[in-house]
Amino acid sequence: MKLKYVFDRVVSTIGLVILSPLLFVTAIMIKILMPGGPVIFKQKRIGRNGREFVMYKFRSMVVGHSGSSISVAGESRITPFGAILRRYKIDELPELWNVMTGEMSFVGPRPDVPGYADKLKGAERAILQLRPGITGPASLKYRDEEELLATVKDPQKYNDEIIFPDKVRINLYYMKHYSFVDDIKMILCTITGKRMIYNNESI
């Protein structure tokens, strides 16, 4: 995976430079439309080999909310401008810094908050050998996760019993059948919103 590591570091650096005007404008808009809080949301996540790191995103929620670790479309804690940022994945652009510093990759399992890694048992813990990603096969399959959770009675339970185990299954397959070409396809699908067939599934 040396090519993957070099690709991540080089492209993330170029991306931060090219996207700097968008990052700057987004930061200004957050200050104007969502005053009283930081521009960047920082959160501890579990990275490679189970080590904690700080992940950076544009803030999309009100300050001081007391919510769960999962997000549901239409929640009052998500601001109107934050909803736009989340819809177009602009809130995740600061994660390019995490990729550049080697804490994350462009493609891989999404980094979970502390606690969820403890749910991984036996062979499932092999996933922790991977750098977490901005996107990945599980992220693409559940790109509309917030909307899906909004349709169920108990979002937390549905996430823990249905979505999380399925993401583990998908990420294990990704680890065992890694392909740099598939990584590029998933990055393009993330950018364009198109779907691809991966492990006989549409993601």
Image (cartoon, rainbow, N blue to C red):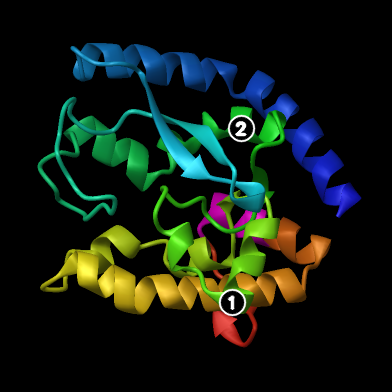
Side of 113 where 54 appears, left or right: right
Side of 181 where 124 appears, left or right: left
**Whether residue 82 is visible:** yes
Residue shown at the point (63%, 58%) measured from the top left: 128
Element under label 1?
A: helix
**Whether residue 196 is visible:** no
Residue shown at the point (74%, 26%) measured from the top left: 14
Q: In which quarter of the image is residue 169?
A: bottom right
Residue position for label 2: 98
Q: Which of marks 2 and 1 is in front?
A: 1
Q: Tell me the kind of residue under disc 1.
A: Gly
* Relative vertical location of residue 7 with respect to residue 79 in this rendering, above or below: below
Q: Position of residue 179 (x, y in %)?
A: 80, 67
Q: Where is residue 26 in the image (x, y as percent from the top left)?
A: 40, 21
Quick check: is 123 in the magenta stretch?
no
Quick check: is 189 in the magenta stretch?
yes
* Relative vertical location of residue 170 with respect to residue 8 in this rendering, above or below: below
Q: Are marks 2 and 1 in contact (CB under 8 Å)?
A: no
* Relative vertical location of residue 17 with respect to residue 174 in this rendering, above or below: above
Distance between mark 2 and mark 1 Cα atoms:
28 Å
Q: Nearer the N terminus, badge 2 or badge 1? A: 2
Q: Magenta segment, which residues? A: 186-193
Q: Name the residue at the bottom extreme.
A: 200
Q: In which quarter of the image is residue 201?
A: bottom right
Residue shown at the point (78%, 68%) measured from the top left: 178
Q: Name the residue at the right extreme.
A: 2
Residue shown at the point (42%, 15%) measured from the top left: 25
The dominant secondary structure in magenta is helix
Q: In which quarter of the image is residue 119?
A: bottom left
* Relative vertical location of residue 161 with respect to residue 8 in this rendering, above or below: below
Residue position for label 1: 122
Element under label 2?
A: helix
